[in-house]
Amino acid sequence: MSRELYLNGTLVNDESDCYVIAEIGNNHQGDVEIAKQMVLEAKNCGASAVKFQKRDNKSFLTRQAFEAPYANENSYGATYGEHREFLELGIPELAEVQAYCNEIGITMFSTAFDLNSVDVLEELDIPFYKVASGDLRNTVLLEKIAKTGKPVLVSTGGGTMKDVIRAYKTVAAHHDQISLLQCTAAYPVLNYSEMNLEVITTYREHFPNTVIGLSDHENGTAMCLAAYMLGARIVEKHFTLNRAWKGTDHSFSLTPRGLSQAVKYLRRIKLALGDGVKIPTRSEESPIYKMSKSIVAARDLAAGEALTQADIAFKCPGNGLPPYEAAGLIGKILTADLVEDQLISHEILKDAQSLGETE
């Protein structure tokens, strides 16, 4: 088996470009037109996909949690339930956004936060699913999603290796189109040591046939680049049009400028890694010619002289014998006159012994 995953027809494996997900989540402020504008910006930034979130809030939350007062600067309602309901896009709204994604050519998928939301997203026929870190231990939800037969990206924030293996096995019992995303479930991550990107290496070793990624809550782009170097081939970054907008995720989300930079640098890293074979490149030819040294006459030399170390010098450009051949020239006899700085070549040299035999 090979480490590969198909996401809406796009192959993701160790040799592929990084699959970059713009996590729109609820940063659309509950507004379909803003959601569509964000989709277009993500597409223009080069993102591979946009991700939304779907909750059935009354089944997702206990009544107490739904009715809990939620009075803060980011609230869209008097209670937490009202806040969540304000931000929720229903089937008609999601279908409108999905149609727009199809029109402009970018993949749309979603996190399902509860069992009812899986049914909603199946009605929309999204191409694959995300499971949030909070549901890493929710084998019931994992199994329902896996039974759709569609690929599943699983965030692993807040979990132990035992939790990750359990989640993996739950999905793998139905199919092998799984990706595990290292994640630190802090919003944002402020302590960089808690990102623990080496977990990517651990996952790659423990799950050799699985595409590994990073759900990145860093307030920047550097860590997703490091993740790619460690073998992550899916990167998810929260996305916004304005980091000053009202809401809990905007402040650490990437704006279009940041997302464009992340995509650009991730593409460049893949190209820059190359194939590991050390050979000169075409772009190096001119600079190396200019900077390299050749073996030349250190002074005017006459035919018949035997070369000594003092007779040779090493000067640019590199259009003659390289310095590493110098030791083999000492003691050889010139068969032609040379002027200072003229290239010394094998063609005008003879061994002292062969010259003696000729004489």
Image: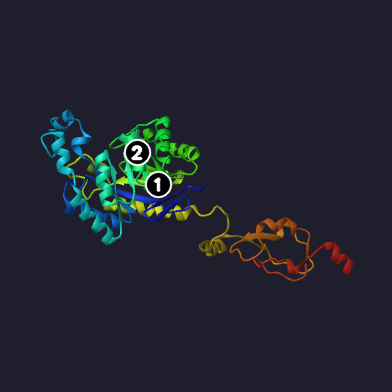
Q: Is residue 317 above or below residue 61?
A: below
Residue 185 seen anywhere in this rendered image of the structure? no
Between residue 307 and residue 239, name the one nearer to us: 239
Circle 1 residue: 225
Amino acid bearing label 1 = Leu
Amino acid bearing label 2 = Leu
Between residue 277 and residue 341, name the one nearer to us: 277
Circle 2 residue: 142
Residue that extends furthest to the left in the rendered view of this protein: 78
Residue in the picture at 33% in, 40% down:
144
> Quadrant of the rendered structure where residue 319 is?
bottom right
Q: Is residue 73 above or below residue 235?
A: above
Quadrant for the C terminus, please. Answer: bottom right
Q: Of helix, strand and loop, which one carries label 2?
A: helix
Provide residue 341's location: percent of width, then percent of height.
Answer: 64, 66
Residue in the picture at 70% in, 58% down:
325
Q: Of helix, strand and loop, which one carries label 1?
A: helix
Q: Between marks 1 and 2, how big is the CA–CA gap?
A: 29 Å
Q: Is residue 333 left or right of residue 237?
A: right
Residue 111: which numbered mark, if any? none
